[in-house]
Amino acid sequence: MDFPVLRPDQFMVMFPSFALMSADCRGGVVQHFDRGIAVVIFTDEANLDDYREKQGLLGPLIRFDSAPQLCMYFDSLPQNVTLVVFDPSAGKPKVFLLADVMSKILESGDD
């Protein structure tokens, strides 16, 4: 599956945001794209619930209430995770470079 990687000015991260852990709680849920591996982040609980149901995911939810919390999560990801996909259940996935997302939310100074 391949989708264009969007420029960092084409998104705004909303809080709270959410991620799902794998069923064995060994890591966050990711999606594989032709361009790399993306961590899956949700900005809407309805999209999260829809994705969880469609994918049959049973892992726990992680809630991020601020930019620093989300960046700490991003910083803990394996180095082969280089992309972020936001709200993949909402239609065409919005895929961004992880480094661009981290830079943008850190420079916003949002706590």
Image (cartoon, rainbow, N blue to C red):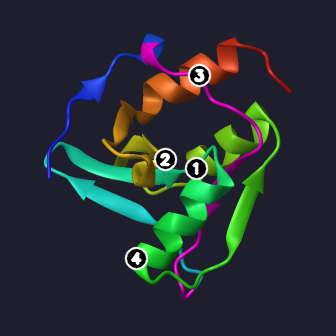
- Amino acid of disc 3: Met
Residue 73 falls left or right of residue 35: right
Element assignment for label 2: loop
Residue, disc 2: 87
Q: Are marks 3 and 2 in contact (CB under 8 Å)?
A: no
Element assignment for label 4: helix
Q: Are marks 4 and 1 in contact (CB under 8 Å)?
A: no
Mark 1, Cα crowd under 10 Å, few <14 / some 14-19 / many 20+, is many
- Amino acid of disc 4: Gln
Mark 4, Cα crowd under 10 Å, few <14 / some 14-19 / many 20+, is few
Q: Is residue 95 above or below residue 51?
A: above
Q: Characterize the magenta stretch by its predominant secondary structure.
A: loop
Residue, disc 4: 55
- The part of the chain drawn in magenta is 10-24
Q: Is residue 78 above or below residue 61?
A: above
Measure the C-alpha gap from mark 2 to mark 1. 5 Å
- Amino acid of disc 1: Phe
- Amino acid of disc 2: Asp
Q: Are marks 1 and 3 in contact (CB under 8 Å)?
A: no
Measure the C-alpha gap from mark 4 to mark 3. 26 Å
- Where residue 71 appears, as percent x and y from the top left, is 66, 38
Please give the name of the residue rendered at 54% of the width and 79% of the height, measured from the top-left corner: 26
Residue, disc 1: 42
Of mark 2 and mark 1, the one earlier in the sequence is 1
Q: Is residue 12 above or below residue 31?
A: above
Residue, disc 3: 12
Residue 51 falls left or right of residue 60: left
- Where residue 40 appears, as percent x and y from the top left, is 47, 54
Of mark 3 and mark 2, the one earlier in the sequence is 3
Mark 2, Cα crowd under 10 Å, few <14 / some 14-19 / many 20+, is many
Measure the C-alpha gap from mark 3 to mark 2. 12 Å
Please give the name of the residue rendered at 35% of the width and 46% of the height, measured from the top-left corner: 91
